[in-house]
Each structure stands twice: as C-alpha cells, then as structure tokens.
Image: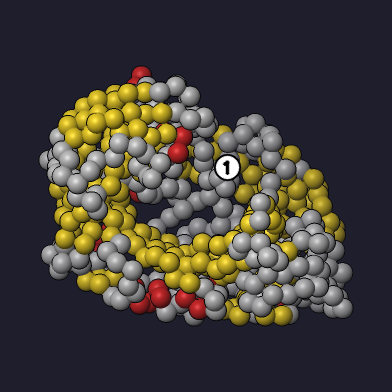
Amino acid sequence: MNMSLISLGLLVGMTGVGCAGLDEAEAVDSVSTDATSQVTQDLVTHVTGTSPVTFVATSGNETKPYDQSATSVVAYTRNSTTGAFTAYPGTGSADGTISVPNVPSGRIYLKLGSRYLVSTSRAFDLGSTEWGRDGTFASLPTPVTVSATGLSPWHPGDFLEMYSLNAGAFGYMGGAATGRPLAGATSLSGLSFDYAHMLNPVLLDSSRGDVFSLAQMRLQTSANGVSYRAMHKVLNASMTQVEGQPTTVNGTFTQPVATGTFEVDWRRSAFEAMRTQVNPGAVSTYNEIWMSARPAALSSAFASISGPPLLVKLNPDAQRTDIVTGSMTYNNPLPAAWQKVATAVAGFTQSYALGTATPYTMNVDIRVEQEASAFTAAPVEPLVGPVQAPLVNTRGAFQNLTGVGTDASLRWSKPLIGTATNYVVNIYRLGTSNGSTTATRVAMLHTDLQSVYLPPDVLRAGGTYFAEIQSWYQPGSNLATSPFKRSLPRGRASVLTGMFSP
C-alpha cells in the first residue's frame, strides 16, 4: 500500500519525589480541564478505532482500510494517586479496526506501535486522505535515464523536479544524479538517477494512468528584485517501472499555456525572533516558502498531504530580514481546479553528543501552511509559537538532567504567540555508531493538555534521551483522537529539550 501518514511515521517521577498528586488536569495553563482523569473503577468501556485511507488520484478516488494487524495496541490508564500505569491489551485487524475491551473510564494513553494518543475519547479515527493512488514503493535501486530536448537555456540556479500526478510520486534530482545539465544547456543527455531515492517513490504504471513528469524549475527575479524559482517547462512521458530494473525516458520539454502569479510579504524576522524559544542554543539554518497545488478533492477534506509538484520556491538568501517580493510568475501544468497551498518554514538545529562521539544534529522548524491566497492577502508570520518553560518533572528541561526516573513527566506553558489546539511530544533515545552520536525516536505522544507522563518502557535505565515538544494550531481537528488528519490553516512550532536520563 502507498505509504500513508499512519505508517510514516511525553512526566512527576523524579528521584526522591513521589508520583502522587499531579494529574494531567493540574498542569499549568491546561488547554482543557479533565475531571475524569481519575480512573472510575466501576465504569468499564470499550476503546475502538477505524483506519480508512482515501487515495485521491486523477484516475479516480479509492478508500481502503489500513491494515492494523501488525500494530501493537494497548490502552494504558494512570492512577493519579500512585502514578502507576495499568495496561489493557487490545488488537488490530486487517480491516483497519482496533479494539481494546474492558478499559475503565477516564483518560487513557492509547498505544499504537510507538505512538500514544492521550485522550478521554473511546472512539478514534485513525484514517487519512492521501494524494495519489494506492501503489508500491521502490525500495531497491531502480535506475531512470532521461534524454530530452526543449529545455530553456539552463541557469546554474535551476533545478529539476520529478512528479507523477496520478501516482502521487515526487522527488528532486539531487547530488547523486549524474548527467545534470551544464550552464546554457538546452537538452538532457543521459540524466540518470535512482528512483528509489525520490521522496515518494511510487512505482509508475502507465496502464493505471501514471505519467512521468520532469519539470524545469527556473531561477527568476520577482517584480521587486527577489530571486525565486518557478515551474517553467515540463517533460511528460509514459513510463512503466519494475522495481530493480532500469527504465529509459525520451521526450521534449514544453511550456505550459496556463500561467499564474504569487507574491508575499514575508516577515522572516518574526520566525527568527523565536529561535531561542526553540532552545537557547538553537542555530538558525534556513528559511523558505513554497507554493504548490493539490487535487480539489483534498480541499474540503482533512487531507494528509500538500507538497510537490512545486509551482514556486522562495529561498533567496541566508538573511533573516523581512521581504516583500512583488509579483512572482510561474507556468502552471496542473489542473485549473486544483487548490493552491503555500508553506513557510524556518529551520533550526540543536546538537547532542554522547561522550566524545561526533554530535548528532537535530533539525526542527516553525512552519505555517495556508491557502496561497492567504499568503498574498496578509503578512506571512507564525500562527503559533513554541511552548514556554518546558520541564522534565519539576526541573527546567533546557539543561541536561540525570535521575529523572523511568516514570518521568514533561510539562510546559502555552506559547506566547497564537493558540495551540494540540501538542505532540517526540522522545528520542541517543546512542553511538562508528564514533557518531545517533538518535532514534522511541515514542510520539499526542495530547490536548500541557503535560504528559511517559508510559512504561519509553525510558529505560542507562539510556539518554531528549524530547521535541511541538505546539500545533489546527482548528477543527484533534490530533489526540484523529492523529493523521490535516486541515488548513495550520501552524507548528518545536521546542528541543536538553538531554535527560533516568
């Protein structure tokens, strides 16, 4: 099955301090008050969930269940007096359903693999809506060689973007591709790349309506003199792939008849102002805006994906100053009815090292996603900021901590900017390999509160960890009960803690 968001894919237990007394409802500035988080022993409920995946393709839409039969399903309750978790085993089925019987009322931590949904709900929507048909990914090296005429004279700042609208495949010709055009070239002669390295490498099948498209994203200058890249010319070719076998494509780049314009007042300084809230030692790495389009059927759904093919990409320099672009033009090969969506991202990094091992660099961002018309109508700035004052148990989380216990808790205060509708907490375990520090995500927790407790076995004695706390602004959807639903507008901002160990 084409990979959905389901498959792609936080604490008082400090040494010397008991767990009793702090329930989720008591967290500072709680989003909601949960009067039922204390387990009521005489009321037993049944936890259920469904996992329909709707594939939206140009050849037609299709809904299938996501197979949950291999998913570890457990509902945990936590006693707010003793701090102890009780596990209630459940099952997942091939028809996409999950079931956990005999669960006491109150807040639960519903475990689905390494993901936990922290909620008082007993019915969970685990479905998603995906762009592209159901298909199979290339995992083995699958070479593609392209020869084509009709390029506009190649600029050193141009790049090539691959996509297939029906399959939902996309990717870019990165450094591993060979035969890329030189300055001034008007043709491709043996451009070669490994299709398995694309970002969404769904194997193409012309009998199912798939078309291989390769776009020249050309370096241009906006009305106000700002550099940007825009969809310019496109090669379309019929192609059927067999995983592990080479494919050759020949054709001609042509310029789409339809055109469009896009302009933004980009408040990059507003994103940069939040850098030290991500982490006092965070480093700014990049900032960019891209504008794309997606099938109209996704515009009214809680859709899981927006992204390539890009129509405009804006990252003109490494500065953090504000930019008013003026008009940016692009050629549009996509269906006129498709909804145009824009994303603004500011990236940040924080380094973690175990002993003398080479540090691991963690990348996070602050981002905004809206309809493209909203980017044009008002200044582009964060919709929600990072959480404030993160704590591991009762200690500041930006420092490195030891002795936090295996039953630790994370707490935080509301963002200073915007309103968070949900929070997602990712827990990473650090390790070493070949002299370098590594990081492995061991848990992801979704909640509408401002504190989470780490369920059993997330933290283990002898391990070293760090957390990413994401604040989400996504009105109309609840990530704690529908974790794979996405709607517009939405914003997200991350905080990275220091290292901590039990």
**Residue 412 picture quarter:** bottom right
- Residue drawn 21% across and 27% down? 251
What's the amino acid at mark 1?
Ser
- Residue drawn 39% across and 65% down? 286
Q: Is residue 39 above or below residue 333?
A: below
Left/right of residue 423 with respect to residue 290 in the rendered view: right
Who is closer to the viewer here, 198 or 93?
A: 198
- Residue drawn 29% across and 67% down? 317
Q: Look at the image and tell me whether residue 366 can be seen.
A: no
Residue 90 in the image, given as x and y percentages of width and height: 76, 43
Residue assigned mark 1: 7
Q: Is residue 292 above or below residue 362?
A: above
Q: Is residue 1 above or below residue 117?
A: above
Who is closer to the viewer here, 253 or 366?
A: 253
Residue 100 in the image, given as x and y percentages of width and height: 75, 45
Left/right of residue 97 with respect to residue 264 in the rendered view: right
Left/right of residue 257 with respect to residue 371 in the rendered view: left
Residue 16 in the image, given as x and y percentages of width and height: 87, 78
Quadrant where the image shows the C terminus: bottom right
SS under mark 1: loop
Residue 336 in the image, given as x and y percentages of width and height: 21, 43
Q: Look at the image and tell me whether residue 446 can be seen.
A: yes
Task: Please tell me how many numbered marks the rendered image carries.
Answer: 1
Q: How would you rate the neighbour count of disc 1 (Cα within 10 Å): few for under 14, some for 14-19, many for 20 or more?
A: few
